[in-house]
Image (cartoon, rainbow, N blue to C red):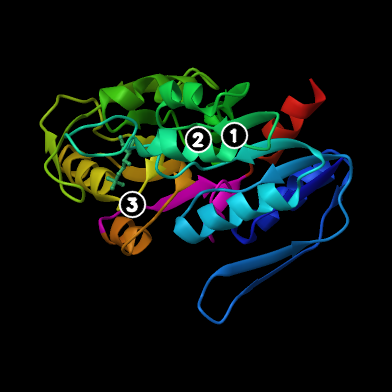
Amino acid sequence: MKVISTEKSQILAARIAKELNTAIVDVKFSRFPDGEHYLAAGELDDETIIVGSVTDSDALVQLLLLIDACEGSRNHLVIPYMGYARQDKRFRSGEPISARAIARAFAEGVENCITVNIHEPAVLKYFGVPTTNLSLAKDLGACIRSMNLSDPLILAPDDGALAFARDVASVEGWDCDHLEKTRLSAVEVKMAPKKLCAASRSVVIVDDIISTGGTIATAAGMLYQQEATEIYAACVHGVLIGGAYAHLKASGIRDVFCSDTIERGCSRLSAANRIAASFRS
Ligand code: R5P
């Protein structure tokens, strides 16, 4: 068995290979003069773990090409961050179900698929091959434990993220609560007032994705008004578009961190262990 990855998931792929004590395949990536992607995979084994986060359309195309390049091997697909998963239904007439379109395309040529904290687990059915969704909630909890905060309050930005936040909090039995959020547009979020016991406490806001950071920056402003002592933000997938990291820091958040499902300077925990474990079991 060997591990192979797209450009955006090389570090995580190398960590998975190390955990499994197996080799990583060398891949040459380049582009044709018109901008089209080109890649050439080195020597493959008869079984391959293909790792590729869908962080953008280029990563998506590279992953499709990589799966095709691995034809002839028994392929296991790992999608640490699956972009397009938030368009999981047809919200308005004429829209695609983007998550379904992506899942169907990826399933061609692989035996099974592993995702990590996929935004909407219901989309797993679209793959048409056996699919497992792993959660890094406990790993995020362990990372928070290592910060030695005094009795932190783990907070979900909305009730949809509460189950995830509870899993994070269960690592040390910390208090857990959620805020109420109304999304006004793709980049604007309104936080409805809610009574929280955040005064004089360290608060860690946890979510599956931090995209623009709008949700958490707004929540932080509200929590500081309630005299929270310090606020941290943590997520699995640090999408961090449009200057989100700086936006969060500017809103007074002491520290922002994520996993390596998207490889960032603030990736502080790895999905490698959990992904590798799923291949051992
Ligand atoms: C949405 O439902 C997700 O769980 C996140 O809450 C959302 O993607 C965060 O978006 P943003 O960082 O742009 O507020």
| Secondary element at image label 2 | helix
- Per the image, label 3 sits on a secondary structure element best described as loop
Q: Which quadrant: the C terminus? A: top right
Instruction: Inspect this view and state whether residue 148 appears.
Output: no
Q: Badge 2 is on which residue?
A: 103
Q: Which range is magenta?
A: 251-269
Residue to which mark 1 is pinned: 107
Q: Position of residue 73 (x, y in %)?
A: 82, 40
Q: Are marks 2 and 1 in contact (CB under 8 Å)?
A: yes
Q: Does the magenta segment cover residue 257?
A: yes
Distance from the alpha carbon under mark 3 to that under mark 1 = 40 Å
What is the three-letter code of the residue carrying label 1? Answer: Ala
Q: CA distance from mark 2 to mark 1?
A: 6 Å
Residue 255, percent across and down? 42, 52
Quadrant of the image where one finds ligand 1: top left
Confirm whether the magenta stretch covers residue 5.
Answer: no
Q: How far is mark 3 from mark 2, CA to CA?
A: 35 Å
Say which amino acid is labelled 3. Ile
Q: Which quadrant of the structure image shows residue 204? A: top left
State whether residue 159 is above or below residue 99.
Answer: above
Residue, disc 3: 253
Residue 243 as seen in the image, left or right of residue 60:
left
The image position of residue 61, as x and y in percent, is: 54, 56
